[in-house]
Image (cartoon, grey):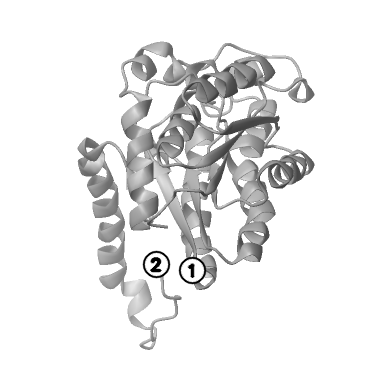
Amino acid sequence: MEDLKGKVAFITGGASGIGLAMAEAFGREGMSVMLADIEAKALTAAVEELRAKQVRAEGVICDVGSRASLRAAALETIAKFGKVHVVCNNAGVGAGGILGEVPESDWNWIVDVNLLGVVYGTEVFAPLIASHGEGGHFVNTASMAGMVSPPGMEPYCATKFAVVAMSEGWAGQLAGQNIGVSILCPGFVKTRIHESRRNRQDSYGPESKEAPAEFAASPVLSGIPVGPVAKRVVEGIKANNLYIFTHPEFRGAVQMRFASIMAGFDAADASEALKALPPRGLLVPNLP
């Protein structure tokens, strides 16, 4: 989608952080935006802020952990704007901890929001985008935690690795319908993810501990501003980039992980256990 003017964007987690910054960046491109968020007061303020900047914006309360809630938000978006072209599955929360000490409720919470929220957003909106025949784009927010997995962040990383994997597959499935897919993988960005428990739904029960150290305020608040991230997203959509990175300084960490993976293949090449097997052709599908 090289020209975004006149198009419509739907953004989850749109009332703050990267989501709100993307809305403003899209508005500067001449897009209309629907902000979806679970936090009512922040949502109202965000819509008013965008309108004050001459962005055509609406808001809808949405719990991305509920397919029904996303369906209702999609219907509200169609009612307001007629169609949707760009969907940013951006809502996310942070949780982690020591092996064996992460509460089951935290696992359920982070999987529902970070993983299933992207599933529901993509499955609900893909047919709506395809139906108008004008093309479209998904931006699924993963993280550098979807590329490397530091100890203590396994719940968060598991969901973000899943977003990467799903998005890679969906890119191939949707390409024939003129629908692009991008995976946004930022490092530390100055957002409020360290405060994400403020919106933890009551259905997950009472908190059993404080937010884990890896989501303390310091590394988040020392991150890059949200504005350049949003501008990078606009670039990525226009260029149909599969991966949208914002922190090139993490290249080395990803290369170290890939080097370990390649070393595993080298070990398989030299394996006595595998030498007796007959030669095999390439059995994996083509990847994007």
Is residue 151 rendered to the left or right of residue 31? Answer: left
Image coordinates for residue 179, horizontal then vertical, percent: 51, 62
Badge 1: residue crowd in 10 Å (few <14, some 14–19, many ≥20): some
- Circle 2 residue: 288
Quadrant, the C terminus: bottom left
Image coordinates for residue 138, horizontal then vertical, percent: 51, 52
Image coordinates for residue 232, horizontal then vertical, percent: 32, 40
Query: Which corner quadrant of the image does residue 187 belong to?
Result: top left
Is residue 219 rendered to the left or right of residue 79? Answer: left
* Residue 97 visible, this orientation: no
Query: Which corner quadrant of the image does residue 15 belong to?
Result: top right
Image coordinates for residue 56, horizontal then vertical, percent: 55, 33
Q: Residue at x 33, y 56 (%)?
A: 239
Q: Nearer the viewer, residue 112 or 55?
A: 55
Badge 2: residue crowd in 10 Å (few <14, some 14–19, many ≥20): few
Residue type of the residue flagged with mark 1? Ala
Q: Residue at x 40, y 36 (%)?
A: 28
Quadrant, the N terminus: bottom left
Between marks 1 and 2 in the image, the one whose residue lies nearer the viewer: 1
| First reached walking from the N terminus: tag 1 or tag 2 | 1
Q: Nearer the viewer, residue 132 or 224?
A: 132
- Can you tell which mark lies on residue 175? 1
Query: Which corner quadrant of the image does residue 95 belong to?
Result: top right
Q: How many marks?
A: 2
Q: Residue at x 64, y 19 (%)?
A: 44
Residue type of the residue flagged with mark 2? Pro
Badge 1 vs badge 2, beta-carbon distance below 8 Å: yes
**Badge 1 element:** helix
* Residue 204 visible, this orientation: yes
